[in-house]
Image: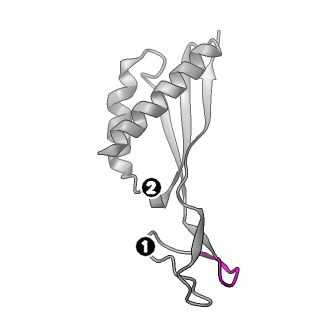
Amino acid sequence: MHELGIVDGVLKTAIETARGAGATKIISVTLKIGAMREVVREAMDFAWEALREDDPLTEKTELIVCEVAPRSACVACGNEFDHDRYHLRCPACGSGQTLVLAGRELDIVSMEIETP
């Protein structure tokens, strides 16, 4: 369950950043996660609920996840196209030489904090 490690890292980063800003509470953390990261949302939510209680700053913090669909570009013909996690072949020319443009993200986009 790599979601536990992801959540642990996100919470550590959020806590460190919030403390540096003088926060008394973290209201929410927003993540952008690409579909190709294969994160199981239920496992992520479970890990979030379990680990957020370890620090008073995060004990009631909401997790907001924005999912990013896969998108690639064909090296051979330049076509950009949306696809699922498994089918990366260009639908225009059939080439397997493609570059993933979106869908592998795992970013902390923002967090809302409360300060005195």
Kindly report the distance in space between the C-alpha atoms of the residues bearing marks 1 and 2. 12 Å
How would you rate the neighbour count of disc 1 (Cα within 10 Å): few for under 14, some for 14-19, many for 20 or more? few
> Residue farthest to the top?
116
Left or right of 16? Residue 58 is left
Q: Is residue 71 above or below residue 78?
A: above
Q: Is residue 40 above or below residue 12?
A: below
For the point 51% across and 76% down, the residue is 88
Identity of the amino acid at label 1?
A: Tyr
Identify the residue position indicated by label 1 in the image: 86
Residue 79 magenta-highlighted: yes
Report if the CB atoms under discs 1 and 2 are less than 8 Å apart.
Answer: no
Q: Quadrant of residue 92?
A: bottom right
Where is residue 112 shown, x and y percent of the image? 62, 28
> Residue farthest to the right?
78
Element assignment for label 2: helix
Q: Main secondary structure of the magenta part?
A: loop
Where is residue 11 shown, x and y percent of the image? 46, 28
Q: Is residue 104 above or below residue 98?
A: above
> What range is drawn magenta here?
75-81
Left or right of 26? Residue 52 is left
Q: Where's the C terminus, which quadrant?
A: top right
Residue 31 magenta-highlighted: no
Q: Quadrant of residue 115?
A: top right
Identify the residue position indicated by label 2 in the image: 37
Q: Quadrant of residue 3?
A: top left
Q: Where's the N terminus, which quadrant?
A: top left
Element assignment for label 1: loop
> Who comes first in sequence, dot 1 or dot 2?
2
Where is residue 19 shown, x and y percent of the image? 57, 14
How would you rate the neighbour count of disc 2 (Cα within 10 Å): few for under 14, some for 14-19, many for 20 or more? few
Identity of the amino acid at label 2?
A: Arg
For the point 54% across and 18% down, the residue is 25
